[in-house]
Amino acid sequence: MCCGWYIGIGRSCSILRNLALSGVTELEKPAYDADPRWFSKLQALELWSEQTAEINPQLLKQLLVSPTLRNLLFTNCAVLTDQLVFEVLAVRS
């Protein structure tokens, strides 16, 4: 999945609370840094990816830093490492 969805949803849905993506085979990060307000109200994130999915860790990190995030569900998300979680927690603190 190219970054078009990310930009479109980020710009258009600034108060988005729940985001669920399924059947993910690829998540690319946009060529430029996204607006920090995008996904800043996110409360729930579900990412159902294929086992061979290529997911950009920077894109995932931006989705995870929302201060209102309470519910997470990941399936086959190898990019979600302990190190990535520590980096997200450091930003959220």
Image (tube, rainbow, N blue to C red):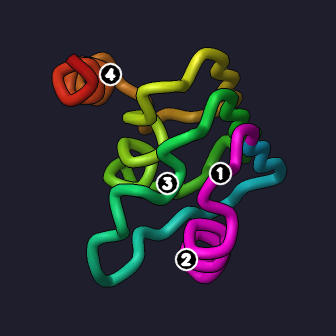
Residue 91 sits in which quadrant? top left
Give the mark toward the camera: 3 or 4.
4
Bounds of the magenta span?
1-18
Q: Check if mark 1's residue and mark 4's residue have beta carbons within 8 Å.
A: no
What residue sits 67% from the left and 34% below the top?
A: 45
Asked if marks 2 and 4 touch (Cβ < 8 Å), the reply is: no
| Camera-side mark, 2 or 3 | 2
> Which amino acid is tagged 2?
Ile
Q: Residues within 10 Å of mark 2 (few under 14, many from 20)?
A: some
Q: Nearer the viewer, residue 66 or 25?
A: 66
- The amino acid on which the numbered mark 3 sits, given as a three-letter code, is Ile
For label 2, the residue is 7
Task: Please state which of residues 72 and 15 is positioned toward the viewer in this rendering.
Answer: 15
Residue 88, percent from left and from top: 28, 28
* Mark seen at residue 15: 1
Three-letter amino acid code at the position of disc 4: Val
Between discs 3 and 4, the one toward the N terminus:
3
Q: Position of residue 54 (x, y in %)?
A: 52, 57
Q: Where is mark 3, residue-wise?
A: 55
CA gap, disc 2 to disc 4? 23 Å
| Residue type, label 1 | Ile
Determine which residue is flagged by label 4.
Answer: 85
Horizontal arrangement in the rendering, residue 27 relative to residue 57 (left or right): right
In magenta segment, residue 19: no
- Image point (60%, 16%), residue name: 70
Q: Is residue 30 above or below residue 65?
A: below
Which mark sits nearer the N-terminus, 1 or 4? Answer: 1
Instruction: Judge whether 4 appears above or below 90 on screen.
Output: below
Q: Secondary structure at mark 4?
A: helix
Query: Dot 1, how many residues are within 10 Å of its Cα: few (below 14), some (14-19), or many (20+)?
Result: some
